[in-house]
Amino acid sequence: MKLDANALLAVTTVLALTLIVTVACSLGPDGVAPKYIGAAAMSVFGFLFLNRLWMISRKRKPKALIQPGQPATLVMALTFPLAMVLSAALPLIAPNGDYGIMIIMAGVFTGLAIQSAAAARMTERQD
């Protein structure tokens, strides 16, 4: 099985989201692990579902974030996992804070990367 750049982006954002949730659960206030795990899952699945509905209502199809032959899109797409990994350091700097919005933002980035990988795969199948 060959992974293209969009699939690798989706894998790295899922791993970065896992890192963020793990660090936030371990360094956040007591008893917030279920809230953070639920926020991560709901933000990813919520983005995928709601964005799909929006795309259907506008009669649009999602596009891949990383386009072959355009290296600038690769560099721009790398900002998602980079920003997510850097934000995972926030609980180390300010322990016992509430990191829910950070997890939701990372979940939306992850949903966008997953949608991009699916769009790239559909485009590959059509070619």
Image: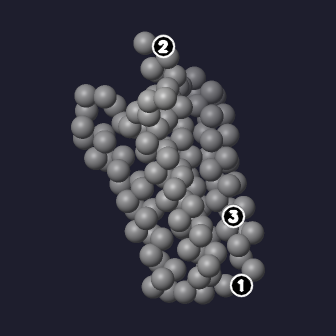
Q: Position of residue 105 (x, y in %)?
A: 54, 60
Q: Residues within 10 Å of mark 1 (few under 14, many from 20)?
A: few
Residue at the image position 53 percent from the left and 65 percent from the top: 19
Residue 102 picture quarter: bottom right
Which percent across, then down, holds residue 11?
49, 47
| Most distant residue in the top direction | 127
Query: Observer-nearest residue: 23 or 49?
Result: 23
Residue at the disc numbered 2: 126
Residue 72 showing in the rendered view: yes
The amino acid type found where label 2 is placed reads: Gln
* Mark-to-mark CA distance, 2 and 3: 36 Å
Q: CA distance from mark 3 to mark 1?
A: 14 Å
Residue 30, label in figure: 1
Q: Is there a contact, CB below 8 Å, between mark 2 and mark 3?
A: no
Q: Is residue 40 above or below residue 100?
A: above
Q: Spot the residue most to the front.
A: 1
**Residue 119 shown left or right of residue 42 in the figure:** left
- Distance Cα–Cα, label 1 vs label 2: 49 Å
Identify residue type, mark 3.
Ile
Q: Earlier in the sequence, mark 1 or mark 2?
A: 1
- SS state under label 2: helix
Q: Which SS class for mark 1?
A: loop
As drawn, 127 above or below 80: above
For the C terminus, give its image quadrant.
top left
Q: What kind of element bears circle 3?
A: helix
Q: Position of residue 49 (x, y in %)?
A: 67, 40
Residue for badge 3:
37
Is residue 62 in sight in this rendering? no
Residue at image position (46%, 21%) is 123
Mark identifier at residue 14 = none
Percent coordinates x, y for residue 20 in the rendering: 54, 67
Residue at 40% x, 68% y is 86
